[in-house]
Image: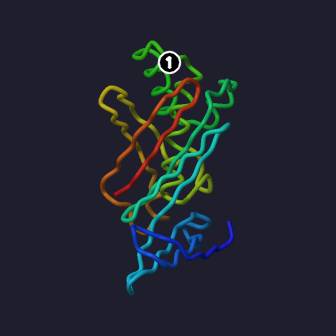
Amino acid sequence: MEDVAFIGEFIGTKNVDIKLCKYFGARCGQPYAQVLFNDDELIYNISISHCKQVVGMGIIDNGLIGIDIEEQRDIDRSVVEKLFSEYDLKCIEKICRLYTDFNWYKAFTLVWTIKESCLKALGIGFRLGFKSIEVKDVDLIENKIFLIISNKVIETIERIPAKVFMYSSIESNLIITLTAFV
């Protein structure tokens, strides 16, 4: 994405300067919006994902945000075993046991979207490896997800906010996960 600037309306105010930008450094390539009006500058972190005809976008003014949308994937289990940690694999199996509407592939896709939305929110992508965020447990009834974040992630990110909000939605074969560190 190239930097884009435009004048438009924002929260009922006319002639507001909005510039879409990309971070550099640890959050390299991650988009944000810089909004200027009335001598105030506001920064909104943005995350975008799409799959098929569905596009999702998360916006947050004070925190980190990531969104991932995936269609259920029928992927070879041996590939998953190489990419995922022991915790991730146990979590997939637990989801299949506890929730009758989940098969192995749907559970894998859910864990994938959780991991990818976290990596997007933290702005590190796959640079530190897919095992740098592990999904220890998922409770879909309480909408609670327990994560293990590796030391190399913590060392890379200047400040990881203390609270994590995560929401996953399963619509037919699409799974959408939004993660916000606030």
In the rendered image of this protein, does residue 110 appear above or below residue 62? Answer: above
Above or below for 6 versus 157:
below
Image coordinates for residue 22, horizontal then vertical, percent: 59, 70
Q: Residue furthest bottom?
A: 39
Give the left or right position of residue 97, taking residue 165 as reference: right
* Rendering coords of residue 180 (x, y %): 40, 52
> Which kind of residue does numbered mark 1 sit on?
Phe
Residue wearing tag 1: 102
The quarter of the rendered structure image containing the N terminus is bottom right
Which residue is at 45% across, 55% downward? 65
Foreground: 15 or 163? 15
Q: Quadrant of residue 42?
A: bottom left
Residue at x-position 51% and y-position 34%: 111
Q: Residue at x 29, y 30 (%)?
A: 142
Is 179 placed above or below 94 here? below
Picture quadrant where residue 182 is located: bottom left
Q: Is residue 178 left or right of residue 164?
A: right
> To which quarter of the image does residue 6 belong?
bottom right
